[in-house]
Image: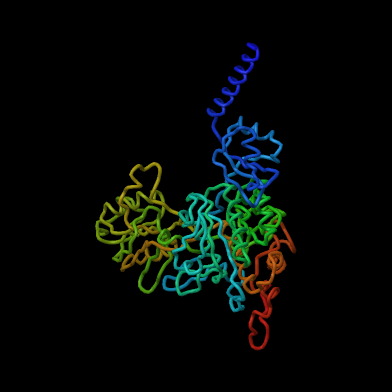
Amino acid sequence: MIAIMKKLAAAAIALFTIAAVAQAEDTERYLIATRQPFHAGAVERVLSDEGLPQRNVDGFESFNGFAADLTKTELYQVSRNANVRWIEPELERHAYAQAPRNLHGQTIPYGIDMIHAREAAVAQHNATTNVVVIDTGVDYTHPELRAIYAGGYNFIAKTDDPLDDGSHGTHVAGTIAAANNSIGVVGVAPDVRLWALKVLNSSGSGSNSNIIKAFDWIIAKKKERGGNWIANLSLGASDPSNAEREAVNRAISAGILIVAASGNESTSTVAAPVGYPAAYDGVIAVGAIDDAESLATFSNQGPELDVVAPGVDVLSTLPVGTGSIAWLESGASTYAAAALTGAKRGTITGAYVYCGLGKPEEIPASVAGKIALIKRGELTFADKAKNAKLAGAIAVAIFNNDLSAMNWTLLGSTDPVANTYDWPVTIGISKADGDLLAARNSGTITVANEADDYGVYSGTSMASPHVAGAAAFLWSAAPAATANDIAAALTQTATDLGLPGFDTGYGWGIVNVLAGVQRLAPSSIPPVNGKRRRSVR
């Protein structure tokens, strides 16, 4: 009897020790694939069977399994459970990302014409397509998007409010469906029904668990409402996920068309493989080209790539007031400009004075109350702006000394007061425009750095929504088509680029909306002078 009691006591001590160790261990989040659906008691058959806590458990419908926080000790226990198929760690997913504006009306982004969306705009729409932006959310208050916004969900905050706090999703949404009105920009398919699922935080990071939940949401919504549905994922990473693959397969089986960005990890010398979820079977993987139809150096490549679309310097919508627009006016001429990061907002008009490189000895006293025109070089932009302000300048225009991009800033880690300094309105202009003004060195100019609802981004993230918009346009013209029909039309009518036929850099080529509509719904396009419009191939 004493021996039995000793054994029981030893067992209790062992169990207590294991529990204490598990409690002391840090937890990590895992996706646990089970042999039965979540709603059929998967958690009970795994965690309860093992006597483990249900820590932050989240079940899925689009793949058989659940997510949970486990210690290493608990992970080992769960892995031996007969009801578990496999386990993988939750993976991070992040946003893929890097035209002069018409200041008095609507700007047509160059990508709209490159994919022949404006030519196809005459096509009759016979139904409304649902497009879901799975991203950082969408600013549904934006004047370009609010009329078509239908709803969504925030998987980060677990609320029904997917308002964008990171700008990426709003930029994507604008390329897909910005309104054809008298302001801003226009999207590929302005007449869609727009949904937003926020799976990425404000910095553009999230998890594949939330992406799987997003597929759950779309599958359920499609079942509830019917209609044709497209999911755009301008996000991803290099690691595949079995759980994510199963969810993608189930969404595709439900008739949902999935479009995803190929990724931005390539360089001019090394081509990176297509990332996930773009690389999964059945997903339309999209690479990026520039306005000259050349492959973007960052665009990921591989046999999974389907098509390419414009993805370099794409102008689209941003959350209201978060963008900036800068310009310089001299007489009847308006010059494109770039605001320097940290510069004050505002529009300043006054006489200008050329101040060389902006060194203190080059800035004349006559700049007081005027605008300082300064050439780039030798000093930091911050030093140039500070020197001009100390001399009494009311604004600063810095002109380039070469043809490089003007991604300039007044802020810097070496200057502890830069973030709180009262910077003047400071803009950058091109070398040619600056040389012209410096040579003239007299007259009145206006420099402006104003809040804006639009901005220019680069990345395969910007290419993917061109294709999602193209797919939505085709489906609106041919609502009886299947998702496979739409995908086939996109690839088979693409304008070939690169090597003849398919290649791993350009896929089947750049999408062609007009050719796709003519393939699927030729009668939707009204004749011109008695003849059917021909596409440009």
Residue occupying the far bottom of the picture: 530
- Where in the figure is residue 373, as x and y percent of width and height? 35, 60
What residue do we see at 62% from left, 76% from top? Answer: 126
Residue occupying the far right of the picture: 501
Q: Quadrant of the N terminus?
A: top right
Q: Is residue 468 left or right of residue 320?
A: right
Residue 240 in view of the camera: no
What residue do we see at 46% from left, 69% from top? Answer: 184
> 145 or 519, which is in the foreground?
145
Q: In this view, does 456 lie to the left or right of 446?
A: right
Above or below, 463 against 273 in this view is below
Residue occupying the far top of the picture: 2
What residue do we see at 64% from left, 44% from top? Answer: 41
> 252 or 378, which is in the foreground?
252
Residue 265 in view of the camera: yes
Quadrant of the image occupied by residue 396: bottom left
What residue do we see at 27% from left, 61% from top? Answer: 370
> 510 or 156, which is in the foreground?
156
Display coloring:
rainbow
Quadrant of the image occupied by residue 503: bottom right
Quadrant of the image occupied by residue 133: bottom right
- Where in the figure is residue 508, as x and y percent of width and height? 71, 63
Q: In which quarter of the image is the C terminus?
A: bottom right
Q: Is residue 381 left or right of residue 23?
A: left
Above or below, 56 against 14 in this view is below
